[in-house]
Image (tube, helix red, strand yellow):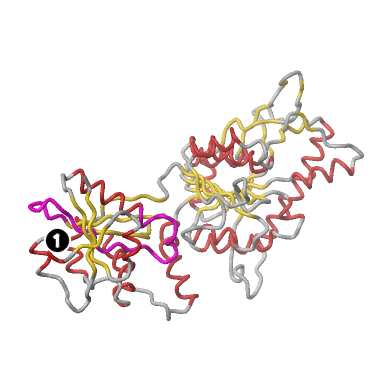
């Protein structure tokens, strides 16, 4: 149990521990644009990648190169040509792609090879492998436009990538691929990342983007969405920044290809990648087909989480002390609200079938998640469960939350309204008030 006197660092480290355990041996695909190198942000990212690697995360890195390619095109006295969101890559532009991508890849490899004292890179011996892991084909002629050496991913050498990951090596993929005939094609980094993540059945695909993630029309960050919700957003929001829209489309495709979770995280926030991965709520936008937050019946594995949640309230006198043994006996009466694997709220429904009523007890919500309707959702779930059992009334005993229950349809009653066996257990020292709600 963690109390309020625990130092913040210790609390943070303990909170991160379940993720450290869960991520070991998992495959993450991390995508970043060439802007991170051009603007001097990649060194900090390299430190975080080294930390992830030291924790046993299998990393596939995918880099973009837009500013580097445009710089080389300009150096040749030309201008970039884009049609319908696709770069047209003629022979001259392909030369710029080779120069820009080649130089950038070497810079990235050099940054990942640094060993700097007093940083997460200190003592790290990272091995980074890049190579011909991608097969490409030409986009061809679309709507009358010949895109020439602009291509799309044809296949991913998953076996070759996995051999490198098994050898504790990072794999670096560039937005260039060769065809079976030996021609090179300019690829979109987003497509490379999605194809690689899908082919590898990656656990996570993480995009480092200009924005903090997906924001609603009022500028509020959308913390997590399902692929279906993302699709509705894309259909309804013509105002989305082009980069965010592209990444959201990619996220939906990646989830459909079997990637468990796709994250959009700000590249401008130092340490954002670690905050997104090792905190329960993250700092970006998560797209996943999995249930991120769910209410369900409790099981024996939830006892520790429930105790962590209710013990501080028991110490304050808000809840009656229960203890592990009693909780183990009554665990079948409990509901839990789970958020990313952690119990953030709970409630118990103790039935008295002979009297046709039930007691709502031990309603508790973690302090970080109060005020967002979770307590009310648990109450509604408990009421529905009582009705399904044919119980016509719900009662609760409380010392602190009288008005909360009054606002939700309960009325104060006397002790004689309680079932006889429950009345016998009433604690006169606590002087709890009794509230009743008809469920008919």
- Residue 57 in picture, x, y percent from top left: 50, 56
Q: Where is residue 8 in the image (x, y as percent from the top left)?
A: 49, 75
Asked if the stretch drawn in magenta spans residue 352, the answer is yes
Which residue corresponds to the image point at 54% horizontal and 44% vertical from the top-left? 161
Tag 1's secondary structure?
helix
Q: Quadrant of residue 410?
A: bottom left
* Left or right side of 172 for 7: left
User: Residue at 59% of width from left, 46% of height from top?
Assistant: 216
Q: Residue 206 placed where, x, y %?
A: 57, 49
- Image quadrant for the N terminus? bottom left
Q: Tell me: 271 left or right of 27.
A: right
Residue that badge 1 annotates: 417
Query: Which residue is nearer to you in this view: 235 or 355?
Result: 355
Say which residue appears at 23% left-offset and 73% top-offset.
Answer: 321
Q: How crowded is mark 1: few (under 14 residues within 10 Å), some or many (20 or more)?
A: few
Q: Please tell me which residue is depicted at 66% across the width and 51% down the height of the picture.
A: 211
Is residue 38 shown left or right of residue 325? right
In the image, which residues are magenta? 351-376
């Amino acid at each position: 149990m963690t109390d309020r006197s625990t130092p913040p660092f210790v609390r943070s480290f303990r909170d991160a521990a379940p993720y450290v355990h869960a991520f070991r041996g998992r495959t993450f695909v991390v995508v970043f644009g060439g802007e991170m190198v051009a603007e001097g942000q990649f060194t900090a990212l390299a430190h975080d990648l080294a930390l992830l690697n030291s924790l046993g995360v299998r990393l596939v890195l995918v880099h973009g190169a837009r500013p580097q390619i445009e710089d080389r095109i300009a150096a040749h006295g030309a201008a970039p040509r884009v049609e319908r969101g696709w770069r047209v890559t003629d022979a001259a532009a392909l030369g710029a792609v080779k120069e820009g991508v080649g130089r950038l890849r070497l810079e990235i490899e050099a940054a990942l090879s640094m060993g700097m004292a007093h940083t997460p890179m200190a003592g790290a011996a990272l091995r980074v492998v890049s190579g011909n892991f991608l097969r490409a084909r030409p986009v061809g002629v679309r709507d009358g436009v010949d895109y020439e050496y602009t291509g799309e991913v044809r296949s991913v050498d998953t076996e070759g990538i996995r051999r490198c990951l098994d050898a504790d090596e990072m794999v670096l993929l560039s937005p260039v691929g060769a065809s079976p005939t030996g021609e090179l094609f300019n690829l979109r980094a987003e497509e490379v990342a999605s194809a690689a993540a899908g082919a590898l059945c990656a656990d996570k695909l993480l995009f480092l983007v200009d924005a903090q993630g997906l924001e609603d029309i009022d500028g509020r960050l959308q913390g997590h969405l399902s692929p279906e919700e993302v699709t509705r957003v894309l259909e309804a929001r013509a105002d989305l920044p082009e980069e965010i829209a592209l990444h959201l489309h990619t996220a939906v495709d990646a989830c459909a290809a079997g990637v468990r979770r796709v994250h959009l995280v700000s590249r401008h926030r130092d340490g954002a990648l670690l905050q997104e991965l090792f905190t329960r709520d993250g700092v970006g936008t998560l797209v996943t087909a999995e249930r991120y937050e769910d209410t369900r019946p409790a099981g024996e594995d939830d006892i520790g989480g429930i105790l962590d949640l209710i013990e501080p309230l028991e110490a304050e006198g808000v809840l009656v002390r229960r203890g592990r043994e009693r909780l183990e006996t009554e665990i079948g009466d409990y509901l839990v609200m789970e958020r990313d694997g952690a119990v953030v709220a709970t409630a118990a429904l103790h039935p008295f079938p002979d009297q046709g009523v039930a007691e709502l007890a031990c309603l508790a919500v973690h302090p970080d998640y109060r005020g967002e309707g979770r307590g009310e959702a648990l109450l509604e779930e408990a009421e529905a469960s009582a009705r399904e059992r044919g119980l016509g009334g719900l009662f609760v005993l409380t010392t602190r939350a009288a008005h909360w229950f009054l606002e939700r349809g309960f009325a104060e009653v006397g002790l004689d309204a309680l079932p006889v066996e429950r009345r016998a257990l009433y604690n006169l020292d606590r002087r709890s008030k009794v509230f009743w709600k008809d469920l008919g």
